[in-house]
């Protein structure tokens, strides 16, 4: 048994944990990170990066398959895809990033211990790994254990019932894929497999897909799913798996949907039961660890960050929390004072939300104005055959302070930085309206939507 001491001990090497480690190391804090699987966590190994790689490959293939039907005069003959090779390419990116994270931790002089952590008390953790057992005493503990896919009791994972992890590593394209849950993961991965050639059916319990967004924001996506041939069944409950596929209940009647694979994407649950965390009897917020504005749990010196602390379960939130906690442990005065956390759904078209929607502003008692600009009136969008969608901005009625942006369209993910910058810097509609946006770019729609809020858009 090895015994170690440190100032900061982090359980979990995902985006929350590894960023916390790097920043702490940069600040000279004696830090150890414990990871039981691969550095980078869900995001890097089985989440953000693999899914975006597969979406890119599927888009590329789909464009080649449909190029001859388009107006550009392109003929493409018999494109084919070798999924095993695509997966190998995706795995290569993941491996490069894994070693990149390891290198960054090493550079920051952070010690990495590979193994499974078990909490003994708020200052002591035991790690069981290939090299035996290590007991670590730390002044501060950060819980960054992340989340796992929710498993439906009547559709246990195994064989043809898969989670996103298996979906992102399949060697063959399933002929028939049924997706249970029309949220972020189901729609991103479901669309990718449709573009790769699968027959895809999405079964969603709510009355529409991505029910957390307003209907106008998801309308272009719903239309695109139809054009692509993705069947979407809403207000439908999955019941169980049958001999050939999934049994669903629709309008009070049961019927079978034939499937080679059933992808279950009905949300993620926090790993607040990992590492015997329950033994600390921390105050919980439902299934999540309750934290304050410094990510401190109910036990002094024990912090929690990332998916284990609640929504939104996004990698960039976990990273920002990790960076903040590292600085707090190093003695800096920090609190969570972010004005917004952008969220991007990498569907076709993409959807971005950042800050408040009109209804959220209303719920807060704020009088707001909403204005938007369609990509149909944007020159760059026309040249990209991407006229679907819009940028929408919400601002206070009394002083034009920007409260939120929503957008949908091809490639709008990259506009999210402008949205967050404007909100964090307290920009008003006239500030954004007065900034020169390069022509021709999709970003001109941000300026135009802001000008529209002031009553004088130029190009509509
Ligand atoms: P995790 O990344 O889950 O990392 C936790 C780590 O802790 C894991 O590596 C785990 O092995 C380790 N661990 C747990 N218990 C122990 C223990 N006892 N001992 C040692 N180690 C332990 N987010 C986005 O922002 N953008 C996206 O595009 C996006 N796409 C996604 C696509 C998919 C398919 C999925 C599944 C998720 C996606 N997410 C996306 C969400 C994102 O992956 C998570 O929000 C993010 O990974 C959370 O980071 P984390 O550090 O909190 O936890
Ligand atoms: P989600 O919460 O986005 O969607 C789950 C969907 O499943 C919901 O629409 C819900 O109504 C539906 N549902 C729930 N139970 C059902 C049932 N029994 N039958 C049919 N439908 C049912 O969850 P997810 O797609 O699993 O993603 C989990 C989290 O991962 C997201 O909330 C997000 O935080 C993160 N994520 C982010 C990105 C991104 O940032 N681009 C991508 C993927 C995942």
Image (cartoon, helix red, strand yellow):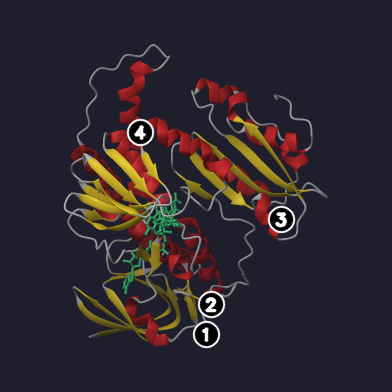
Q: Is residue 147 visible?
A: yes
360 sits to left or right of 210: right
- Taking the spot 24% from the left edge, 39% from the top edge, the residue there is 86
SS for tag 2? loop
Kindly report which numbered mark, 4 or 1, lies closer to the viewer in this rendering: 4
Q: Work out whether mark 4 precedes mark 1 in sequence or the reverse, and give the earlier one.
A: 4
Estimate the spatial distance between the alpha carbons at disc 4 and disc 1, rounded to whole Å.
53 Å
Which numbered dot is residue 140? none
Of residues 2 and 170, which is closer to you in this image? 170
Nearest to N terminus: mark 2 or mark 4? 4
**Which residue carries the number 1 mark?**
300
Residue 257 drawn above or below residue 80: below
Q: Quadrant of residue 430?
A: top right
In the figure, is residue 303 to the left or right of 121?
right
Give residue 63's position: percent from left, percent from top.
Answer: 35, 26
> Which residue position is annotated with label 2?
296
Q: In this view of the protein, can residue 53 be seen by the observer?
A: no
- Which residue does the numbered mark 4 point to in the structure image? 229
| Circle 4/circle 3 CB separation < 8 Å | no
Q: Please name the residue that numbered disc 3 is placed on.
A: 362
Point 41% across, 70% down: residue: 144
The answer to which quarter of the image holds residue 224 is top left
Q: Secondary structure at mark 3?
A: helix
Q: Distance from label 4 to label 3 (Cα)?
A: 37 Å
Pick out the residue farthest to the top.
73
Measure the C-alpha gap from mark 2 to mark 1.
7 Å
Q: Earlier in the sequence, mark 4 or mark 3?
A: 4
Q: Earlier in the sequence, mark 2 or mark 3?
A: 2
Q: Nearer the viewer, residue 420 or 212?
A: 212
């Amino acid at each position: 048994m090895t015994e170690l001491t440190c100032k900061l001990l982090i359980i979990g090497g995902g985006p929350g944990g590894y960023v916390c480690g790097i920043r702490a190391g940069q600040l000279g804090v004696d830090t150890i990170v414990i990871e039981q699987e691969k550095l980078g966590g869900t995001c890097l190994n089985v989440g953000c990066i693999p899914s975006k790689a597969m979406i890119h490959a599927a888009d590329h293939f789909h464009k080649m398959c449909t190029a001859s039907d388009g107006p550009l005069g392109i003929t493409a003959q018999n494109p084919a895809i070798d999924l095993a090779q695509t997966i190998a390419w995706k795995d290569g990116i993941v491996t490069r990033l894994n070693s990149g994270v390891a290198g960054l931790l090493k550079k920051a002089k952070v010690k990495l211990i590979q193994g499974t952590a078990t909490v003994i008390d708020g200052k002591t953790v035991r790690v069981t790994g290939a090299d035996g057992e290590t007991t670590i005493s730390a002044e501060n503990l950060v819980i960054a254990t992340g989340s796992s896919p929710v498993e439906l009791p009547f559709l246990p994972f195994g064989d043809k019932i898969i989670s996103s992890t298996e979906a992102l590593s399949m060697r063959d394209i399933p002929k028939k894929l049924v997706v249970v849950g029309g949220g972020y993961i189901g729609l991103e991965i479901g669309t990718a497999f449709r573009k790769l050639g699968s027959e895809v059916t999405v079964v969603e319990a709510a009355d529409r897909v991505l029910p957390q967004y307003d209907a106008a924001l998801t309308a272009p996506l719903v239309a695109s799913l139809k054009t692509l041939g993705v069947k979407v069944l809403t207000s439908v409950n999955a019941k169980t798996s049958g001999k050939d596929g999934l049994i669903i209940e629709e309008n009070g009647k049961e019927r079978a949907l034939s499937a080679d694979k059933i992808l279950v994407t009905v949300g993620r649950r926090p790993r607040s039961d990992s590492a015997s965390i329950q033994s600390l009897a921390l105050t919980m917020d439902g299934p999540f660890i309750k934290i304050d504005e410094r990510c401190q749990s109910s036990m002094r010196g024990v912090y929690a960050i990332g998916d284990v602390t609640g929504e939104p379960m996004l990698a960039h939130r976990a990273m920002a929390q990790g960076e903040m906690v590292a600085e707090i442990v190093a003695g800096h005065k920090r609190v969570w004072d972010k004005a917004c956390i952008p969220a991007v759904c990498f569907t076709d078209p993409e959807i971005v939300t950042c800050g408040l929607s009109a209804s959220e502003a209303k719920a807060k008692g704020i009088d707001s104005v909403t204005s938007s600009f369609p990509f149909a009136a944007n020159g760059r969008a026309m040249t990209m055959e991407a006229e679907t969608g819009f940028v929408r901005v919400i601002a206070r009625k009394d002083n034009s302070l920007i409260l939120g942006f929503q957008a949908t369209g091809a490639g709008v993910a990259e506009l999210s930085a402008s949205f967050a910058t404007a909100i964090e810097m307290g920009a008003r509609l006239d500030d954004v309206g007065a900034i020169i946006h390069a022509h021709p770019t999709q970003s001109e729609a941000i300026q135009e939507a802001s000008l529209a809020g002031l009553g004088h858009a130029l190009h509509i």
